[in-house]
Image: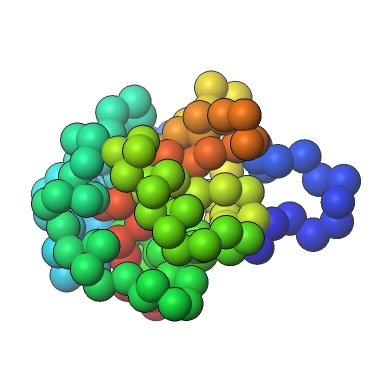
Amino acid sequence: MAASGATQKLPVECGEEVMSQKAHGTSEKPVQENLRYDCDRATADRICNFNRHYAEHSGYAMGKTSWLRTISMTEPTEYFDSNTGKLLFTAPIGRTHEEFINESKAHGWPSFRDEEVNWEFVRCLENGECVSVDGTHLGHNLPDRSGNRYCINLVSVAGNPV
């Protein structure tokens, strides 16, 4: 899912205009009904559409949802925008399920790497905020010694495909 061609700099950046005010906060519409992983819709709507800096509580994905009990431990899982249903991430790619889960648990949020990002629909602002091209706040890029690490709110990627 990484950008095509070895010369594209990651993350793919965008300007503040992506997060401008729209019909429903920074998005055109509220989050979907019946989010996956038993994510709370009110929390998701607040974080996705009316927030630029805050996150779901650390460990929310591990302790308050069915995420770890419902994802495949043999095949990569696709994660969709909670507003639009567009495919944003697929993980794990280039690492084991155990490595993906352990890193996510260690940091408190699902943590994705460059090759797991669908750059058609995901962007980062200069300050590290990770967003969808449609204005959904996703989380932040917090690089570490292994490279870019996208620390993403589960409520932001619990949508159903459309």
Whole-percent x and y of residue 63? 14, 50
Please tell me which residue is depicted at 37% across the width and 75% down the height of the picture.
Answer: 72
Say left or right for 157 vs 41.
right
- Front position in the image: 32 or 107: 107
The quarter in which the C terminus is drawn is bottom left
Q: Is residue 53 shown above or below 151?
A: above
Residue closer to the observer: 56 or 125: 56
Question: Which scheme is used to colour this image of the protein?
Answer: rainbow
Q: Residue 58: where, in percent of width, then height? A: 23, 35
In this view, 27 is above or below 81: above
Residue pictured at 57% horizontal, 48% vertical = 113
Give the side of residue 64 with respect to residue 94, left or right.
left
Residue at the location (40% across, 64% down)?
Answer: 80
For this view, does 137 lie left or right of residue 108?
right
Residue 85 location (% of width, % of height): 39, 67
Disc tally is: 0
Relative to 11, is 109 on the left or the right? left
For image coordinates 35% across by 38% down, the residue present is 106
Report the quarter where the N terminus lies: bottom right
Q: Which residue occupies the foreground of this view, 113 or 5?
A: 113
Residue 131 seen in the figure: no
Q: Quadrant of residue 50?
A: top left
Is residue 46 shown to the viewer in this render?
A: yes
Judge by depth and name the residue closer to the eye, 30 or 40: 40
Q: Position of residue 32 (x, y in %)?
A: 24, 64
Q: Name the image quarter holding residue 144.
A: top right
